[in-house]
Amino acid sequence: MNKTRASGRTVGGFRTLSLQAPAVTLLLLWMLVPLGMTLWFSLQRYNLLMPGMTGFAGLENYEYLLTDPALWKSMGNTLLLVGWVLVITVVGGTLLAVLFQQEFPGRGVARVLAISPFFVMPTVSALVWKNMMMHPSNGVLAWLAESIGLPALDWFSSLPLTSIVIIVAWQWLPFALLILLTAMQSLDDDQVEAARMDGAGPVAIFFFITLPHLKRAISVVIMIEMIFLLTVFAEIFVTTSGGPGLATTNLAYLIYIRALLDFDVGTASAGGVIAIILANIVAIFLVRMVAKNLES
Amino acid sequence: MTTVRNKQLSSTPNAGLATATQAPGRPLVTTVNTKRLLLTALGWVVAGTIFFPIFWMVLTGFKTEAAAIADPSLIFSPTLDSYIEVQQRADYFKFAMNSVVVAFGSTLLALLIAIPSAYSMAFLPTKRTKGTLLWMLSTKMLPPVGVLVPIYLLFRDFGLLDTRTGLTIVYTLMNLPIVVWMLYTFFKDLPKDILEAGRMDGASTFQEVIFLLMPLTLPGIASTGLLSVILSWNEAFWSLNLTSSQAAPLTAYIASFSSPEGLFWAKLSAASTMAIAPILVFGWLTQKQMVRGLTFGAVK
Amino acid sequence: MKFTRALPLAGIAVVGATATAASAETITVATVNNNDMVIMQSLTSEFEKAHPNIKLDWVVLEENVLRQRLTTDIATGGGQFDVMTIGTYEAPIWAERGWLAELNDLPEEYQVDDLLKPVRDGLSQNGTLHALPFYGESSMMFYRQDLFDEAGIEVPEQPSWEEVRDWASQLHNPQEGTYGICLRGKPGWGENMAFVSTLVNTYGGRWFDMDWNPQLDSQAWQEAISFYVDLLNNYGPPGATSNGFNENLALFSRGNCAIWVDATSAAGKLYGADESKVSDKLGFAPAPVAETPKGSHWLWSWALAIPSSSEKQDAAKTFVTWATSQDYVELVGETKGWTNVPPGTRESTYENPRYQEAAPFADFVLNAIRDADPNDSTLEPSPYKGVQFVGIPEFQSIGTQVGQMVASALAGDNTVEQALQAAQTATERTMKRAGYLD
């Protein structure tokens, strides 16, 4: 066996195939069966509530979605949401990681508290923020504002997208913190010490040693978060229902309103296909960049 | 809340003060101690602020409905009424059991499928490995609302609606890309010679994976599994749509308390607390493990 | 479920449950998490006692989630539920598609003629009932008698919206935590649009003309929405765009609103519930009108239906007739108090002296329901059935989209004109796509 491996690539190829087969086959099935069905349905006139009206629709479903004035707005919202949450969690996560890397009494407990939001279901965190934090008359934030003499802010109608960003960022900040803290622990102490000897201040150390060291971890955070942030749904569904107007309608929510509420499977499928294409465009730009980072 | 904590804590840094005073040079000592005090305060304020919504939710669960919507207050007489009422309406344990079975079941299944796959990607890479990995990850970017109906039809035809099996399958597939990718990063960092040595001794691929690879990367595998458990536990779209009564997990449990009539803050808080408590405690207990595992692979 | 609770010892519980499961049939009931349904769920043991061979399994969900869940299941023939809680909107549409079992040969003692006629008609398709009403409602005006007395305001028999605005401005006192008026603002066809549709109706507007052309850019819509936006922005509570029925119920019952126009089913909760601070200072009036009284108040009922895909139709029918019977009303009245009785379904409830005594608002509600006519609710003729909704499948998404636009006008992101123009365009698109328009 050792010999064959040394001599022939075929065995390696076979091994690769047989080992990857279960995962790849399953994912292919998971991806291709629904994707195939989605592609097929996206070309059909198929509405669950209209059992009689079926037939080939051509590109009608795509046309309907692509000419929707709300589409661009919702794509913009999707990117804004993803972008801002990424910025907040990466920057905030890095700062928090630096903070929780320092020795102080009770650090262990403080860390555990700070990473807790990651374990909370998105539905629950949206409900808690909506009803107990940001509620304009009963919320803690309203009470805080009033107790220092400011008018209570009506979060979901004055700053709808910001509110969603805050909720989503609150959930993902701990994830970034966890990953970045982990990465920070593998930072070479001697290197930091040496830099300090050379007269580097804490700020310089952070920018020239810590940050470059975290590059790979930051890439991981961006990649994993992006996957989840592109399809944020529960937080919007629970709090603003995509409104007021289209202020918080992202692509996933738009597909929900335009298609699923109507049970228009054809259009929902077309929406799914468009979302995949969009995701892949983002993937090409961002994931590739990140992936390159992961190589080094 | 934070002020109370800080007061309590202000005594602890004195220990640091005592040790630091032994060092020569007084001015240095005071700056070090002030810094340390500030750092402690900052650390606790930040952690407290981040944790506050959860703390507040737990607290609200023990209030009466009237107290729950009154002005925020830490002083109230705690009551278990909300918990009792919530339990009367829906049997928590049934939902929790489903969550446990599905979250752990899907994680085990995902690891079982992903380990060989990640192994071959890491040790027997081909030209297409990178592409396959990226493609796997991009499958996760499809919004579930777009494929609900096709999946529902499939589930209906295979009799998987409202079964733990069905939900386990969906979660397995949902988490597989991330699991494969994380394992890949762990495996890739393993020194190749170790496996080579094993192979020289005549180990089969199976033995190689079981006796060499897995023990060496166990922390990484564990933290991948933990992440998968958390993600499955918190998933709320498929669980709501593919189950009804028998297999419904805790995310469905929450949906029955989410915006009912009348005053509901306390009941909602009680239900939410119970829904997140297991995974929160699980997360707290395993976070060290998770961090330890992560240091091996992707984020090293 | 019941068994595991009664016998916490796991082993015994399992044996016990399997033993009974063999002889009993379990039906799955899907319902909304509204108070009346929660009461129904809490009476499970009463039902199981009376029908020992039927066990109930509950799926209780929030309204929006439930609706989507049920539609997916019934349209694909998933067969997950034996009893579904649906509304006046779904019943005829689903019945037309043959998705619901017909409920014609009901037992004598059920007294089907006792059901209020408008409610019964709303759940029928071609004269056949396809769902039985669990509770019914119209809309009406609630106000704070104490505040009105203090300000010396006399409410006429039929208030007008102009008057309501004047009263709201007089009583608006945000420093004291009292807002002039609370109205629905949360986007959704069953939330803000239910209210807004009645307002548009009474301003003489309609959703569609006889050729299904959307009328959202008409004068009547402009006037109605401008009035609504001004009213709520000047005299409403903060965060009106996230207030639906439940949020407003909470606000009003805590004494934060002087006036509230919403579902009649809130009356029982405001009047009797232990959670209401305003039970002793509550005033009632019919829903206000503007140009025309037509369509100024809605008609809705939550009803129990049996999907044709259910394999346990007989057991399901036994449950459905039990939960909508006179005896059930009696049972709730005796065990949970008469204000908690499911309102708006039966003449006999309103003739019951104990209910009349406990619920002084009963006559208002009965009149409002009797008076609502889903077939003739607009000043100019319209092609659709429904007061606060349009009885076509596309309305869920149309109503929700328009609801978002109205909310954006309320939040001040758009002017009323812009919002309605956008709503008109979106509705035209949907109607064209559905084949109503060329």
Image (cartoon, coloured by chain):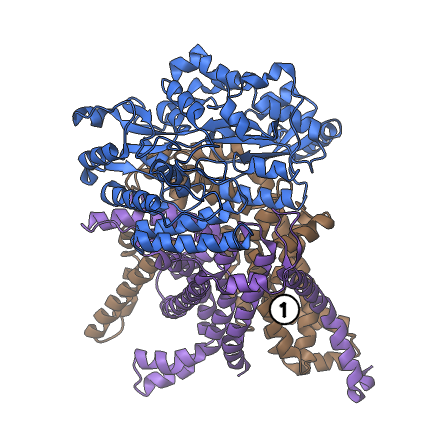
Chain colours: A purple, B brown, C blue
- Residue appearing at x 47%, y 71% in the figure: A222
- Residue appearing at x 42%, y 66% in the figure: A76
Give the percent coordinates (x, y) of residue C61.
53, 40
Give the percent coordinates (x, y) of residue C43.
55, 24
Q: Is residue B52 above or below residue C25?
A: below
Q: Amino acid at mark 1?
A: Val
Q: Quadrant of residue A37?
A: bottom right
- Residue appearing at x 50%, y 43% in the figure: C64
Work out whether residue C319 or residue C291 is closer to the camera in this orientation and state it. C291
Give the position of the N terminus of chain A as an image quadrant: bottom right
Report the residue that reaches farthest toward the top.
C353
Label 1 neighbourhood size at 10 Å, few (<14), some (14-19), many (20+)? many
Work out whether residue B80 or residue A269 is closer to the camera in this orientation and state it. A269
Give the percent coordinates (x, y) of residue C342.
48, 24
Give the percent coordinates (x, y) of residue C29.
61, 33
Left of B164 or right of it: where is C436? left
- Residue appearing at x 68%, y 73% in the figure: B119
Q: Quadrant of residue B27?
A: bottom left
Q: Which residue is mark 1?
A: B180
The reply to whether residue C409 is visible in this rendering is yes
